[in-house]
Amino acid sequence: MTKSTLVFDPFSEEYFNDPFEIYRRMREEAPLYYDAEQDFYALTRHEDVAAAFKDYESFSSARGCDLAMVRTGDVPQKSIIFMDPPDHRHMRSLLNKAFTPRAIQSQRESVIELIDKYLGAIDSDEFDIVQDFSAPFPVEVITRMAGVPEESRQQVRHWIDTSLHREPGQVEIGEAGMKANIDSAMYYYNLIQERRADPQDDMISRLIAAEIPRPDGQLGKLDDIEITGFAVLLGGAGAETVTKLVGNAVVIFARNPDQWQKLFDDRSKIAAAVEELLRYEGPVQYNVRYTLKETHLPSGTIPAGKPVFLIGAAANRDPEAFTDADKFDIDRDRSQAQNLGLGYGIHSCLGAALARMESAVALEKLLDFMPRYDVIWDGLARVHMQNVAGWSNVPVKILR
Ligand code: HEM
């Protein structure tokens, strides 16, 4: 039998439906994958992806983190995720203060309250875990921290969904996505003006007051565009991802009911389960970088000036890094290799502590709410998105 040609097309229906078989072939047959037509590279082996994430001097984020942006260098907003050092270092040390494990721990009660509110509103044994639960709650957590008034918090989620959506074959952002980006930026811009006039106890007000080293070496305040950029990013980075993690979790546990039972019997495994979910099928599939110089990796050399997909989700299934990599095992030995589900290196997830806490509380509450359940398999529907993968619909039935 002849093998089909190996094609990594991150905007194809085939890829959206099951990226893992494509990743396996890429790791084995083309660890330094090159797409001649589109002129990009892609890395899938753990040792290559981890090395590239670490090497920010070669792999720049300043032209953006997805293919369309990196090609044009046209980043939609000034934002930490699109910065290289030294700008990145200054911004990160400022923002780190808002996301210390202690600061996040203080959010725990309100996360529990929100999760209880959404689960409490479900009044049937059949419901959609994404639409009714994992989509609405994370955006409320993060926008509340930012300072968005309650009545606008779900609107932020709809803007993000529209902005990230891609039809099969669509690389560039569409008209609706562009409009959503502009609308959300305008919204935050206006909110920042309100907070300048009347500061509150929220992140936007604290960013308005903060000072960081500016390019001239002097301390200076952030401008409206910088604060807007961060607020827009936070909504996307902090909401979509947790939504996807919880939706993926429910599907993965339904396919591995022994693991759900194990968690039910021993809640002390919840933190480990979150790590395994991030490894096995984390919401972020890849981040794109741009090579500033010719770069040597274990699998070969990449010339300067190329977009490179760092596919963390493929590296997390690399059998050279993880024993039985395709097995979902909440008890696995986590010291084997770096889990790349929350990124790695200087851009590794700023909201990691929050992501872990929200996901752990969600799992804990779901164990109580649906100790036995099944997915209504023919109702599953995937999102078609840039960078992130997961489900838009996960209908479930609680088994009594
Ligand atoms: C399960 C949930 C999450 C996952 C899987 C995730 C994953 C990631 C990944 C892979 C990166 C690296 C991006 C890159 O290298 O280009 C990242 C960065 C980032 N994440 Fe998360 N994230 C999650 C939740 C959150 C939350 C809740 C927040 C809210 C604060 C957040 C805020 C950020 C920010 C601001 C960055 C950029 C950091 C930088 O550039 O220095 N993330 N995240």
Image (tube, rainbow, N blue to C red):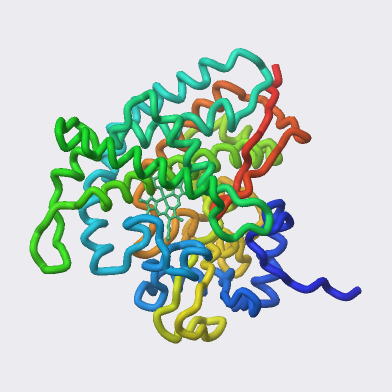
Q: Position of residue 150 (x, y in %)?
A: 36, 24
Q: Position of residue 229 (x, y in %)?
A: 33, 50
- Residue furthest to the left in view is 218
Picture quadrant where residue 25 is located? bottom right
Q: Residue at x 13, y 44 (%)?
A: 209
Residue 11 in view of the camera: yes
Q: Residue at x 65, y 42 (%)?
A: 252
Picture quadrant where residue 139 is located? top left
Total tally of numbered discs in the picture = 0
- Residue furthest to the top in view is 123
Locate the N terminus and report the quarter of the image it occupies. bottom right
Q: Position of residue 225 (x, y in %)?
A: 27, 51
Q: Indicate whether 74 appears above or below 394.
A: below
Q: Indicate whether 124 appears above or below 282.
A: above
Locate the C terminus and report the quarter of the image it occupies. top right
Picture quadrant where residue 250 is located? top right
Q: Position of residue 295 (x, y in %)?
A: 45, 84
Nearer-the-camera pick, 236 or 128 = 236
Residue 269 in view of the camera: no
Nearer-the-camera pick, 384 or 333 = 384
Q: Residue at x 24, y 57 (%)?
A: 91
Taking the image as shown, residue 269 lies to the left or right of residue 260, namely left
Taking the image as shown, residue 181 lies to the left or right of residue 277, namely left
Q: Residue at x 53, y 43 (%)?
A: 162
